[in-house]
Image (tube, rainbow, N blue to C red):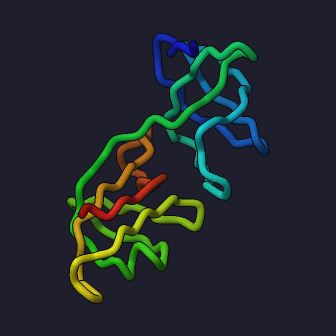
Amino acid sequence: MPSERNRAATVIAREGDRVRIEHAGKQLTVPLRGFPPGFELRPGTRVIVVDEPSGPVARPLVRAVRATISPDLVQKRARINVAERQIDIQPGTVVEEPPSPVDNPAVEEYVLWIVERADREATDQVIAALRRR
């Protein structure tokens, strides 16, 4: 079974399906796992380094935020403001939209899974969005 290392790591650069990270004061290049296809991982993003049988890999480090937003903005993959923070819903974001009890609601409650960042001033990235039922 995979196990976490002691700390999160900070992304320095993405290199195809691998990522160069700073972990425990050292730079490593490891494979990415658990990110959706097309997700644009930015420098400054934090990941968890997990030891798998094939060696260490970088997996998403996320936090969940509830937000009431327009389903249109989610579908358009727009930059929006949530709790006074700018967040990007990008083409690679996974979106689950169970049917709404109301036809064409103006706003809906979502759970947004946001990738952690080392720099709190940067725009957050949504890796997944789930409309609440």
Q: Quadrant of the C terminus?
A: bottom left
Residue 49, picture quadrant: top right
The quadrant of the picture occupied by the N terminus is top right
Quadrant in the picture for residue 79 = bottom left
- Above or below, 83 against 71 in this view is above
Q: Taking 70 as reference, is 93 left or right?
A: right
Above or below residue 68? Residue 16 is above
**Residue at image location 52% in from the left, 32% down from the top:** 47
- Residue at the far right in the pictured view: 16
Give the image location of residue 58, x and y in percent.
Answer: 61, 29
Residue lying farthest bottom? 104
Q: Position of residue 68 (x, y in %)?
A: 21, 68
Q: Is residue 126 left or right of residue 23?
A: left
21, 55: nearer the viewer: 55
| Vertical position of residue 16 compared to residue 77: above or below | above
Q: Position of residue 34 (x, y in %)?
A: 59, 39
Residue in front for this viewpoint, 104 or 126: 104
Residue 32 placement (x, y as % from top left) = 67, 35
Residue plotted at (68% across, 40% down): 13
Pick the residue in front: 19 or 44: 19
